[in-house]
Image (tube, helix red, strand yellow):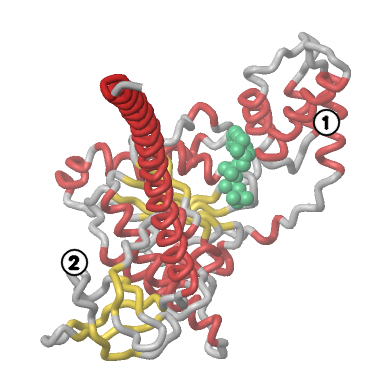
Amino acid sequence: MSDSRVGADFSRYLLDRMRQLEERNLTLREQKDRAEGEKRIIENQKLKFEREVRKLRSELERLKTGPLVVGTVQDVLDDDRVVVKSSTGPRFVVNVSQLIEEDIKPGIRVALNQQSFAVMFALPTSQDPAVFGMEIEEAPCIEFDQIGGLESQISEIRETVELPLKRPDLFEKVGIEPPKGVLLYGPPGTGKTLLAKAVAHSTEASFLRVVGSELVQKYIGEGARLVRELFELAQKRSPAIIFIDELDAIGSRRIDSATSGDREVQRTLMQLLAEMDGFDPRGEVKLIAATNRADMLDQALLRPGRFDRLIYVPLPDRVGREAVLGIHTRCMNLHEDVDLRRVADASEGASGADLKAIATEAGMFAVREERDMVYHQDFEHARAKIMDSQPEREQENFPDVSFGQYA
Ligand code: ATP
């Protein structure tokens, strides 16, 4: 074999080898790119998982930290220290965390570290209605024509609550202070809440309803704080009507031999009296209270200047009962044999709430039998059902309460 032939073979071999190596190189480069892409994806996932682990760890830490104590700042000392009263009672001089941005001033609620009682952060004012179950309605949609048989009570409540809110100038001209509050008393279910709601509607006032028993709290001073916040909230939402239902829960006559629980209720009552004395009769906040037990109320509440009018809301008489039945059957499909007067005649002693129940029950009889019309006998059956299930009412619980008696 000549030298030139060997050279040509060798160079062909080299060329082939080079091509093979280039192809191999290409494949390896592709594999490398793929691996790098996968590496990036895995790194991203790793970062994501690390973030998640960090988040879960911090959540775990957060959940493991002990509860903070709620306290109220009583005094701010010069050197970043404050006097706080913890909700369990004692007062402490404590440090304030440097991280707090809010202005720490006397009266605000704060969260305290359990060990050092240092102020950790300021709490929002608890004027959230949910905090103590207050019902708030912007001008509730109850109108006076939805109340039956209480004409004199309606005109009295309009005069004492609506007039001062709508025409304060009349009182200024005459030079008298308008009434601050009205007490509605009488048997249950006679329309006391309805009256308060209707007057809030006609004056376009916010309606703040709180039940007296909700103002009775476990810890000392809490009830009084709620009363204070209730009036502050009403001021903010003015014109407003505060409606305290079951006033007897906090307004019962004070007695000398009181337990610590009684004393807390008395403190709440005193705060209520103080708020009533403090608020401007010409202002846009009016107080309406209701009770089934006016005879139990403390004399201090019943003197003029606190509740200026005591309005008795009685069980409806025959005419009243017919009117209430008329209201609650307005939207019902009644047969022409229905005689509401006879139903009213036969339901002596029924309250407005009972009469509403009779109308609803009569409708239920029709529904049960898949009728689209309600007959008189449905009302008879409903009346018997509702009235027979009622315990005898004790009329003597509702004596005629008057200023003269208590002043
Ligand atoms: P309580 O003292 O138990 O709180 P209350 O006197 O405030 O009772 P309301 O809550 O006003 O009674 O009335 C209960 C229901 O009875 C009302 O929702 C209403 O449907 C009906 N009712 C009571 N009185 C009347 C009335 N005079 N006219 C029309 N409906 C009435």
Residue 280 visible somewhere in the drawing:
yes
Quadrant where the C terminus sits is bottom left
Mark 1 is on which residue type? Ala
Q: Residue furthest front?
A: 1
Q: From the viewer's perspective, is 300 left or right of 187?
A: left
Q: Which comes sooner in the sequence, label 2 or label 1?
A: 2
**Local crowd at mark 2 within 10 Å, few (<14), some, or many (≥20)?**
few
Q: Which residue is mark 1?
A: 382
Q: Nearest to the eye among marks 2 and 1: give it.
A: 2
On residue 164, the disc is none
Q: From the viewer's perspective, is 323 left or right of 354?
A: left
Ligand 1 sits in quadrant: top right
Distance of label 2 from label 1 (alpha carbons) = 63 Å
Asked if 33 appears above or below 91 in the picture, the reply is: above
Residue 156 visible somewhere in the drawing:
no
Residue positioned 40% across, 72% down in the render: 224
On residue 101, the disc is 2
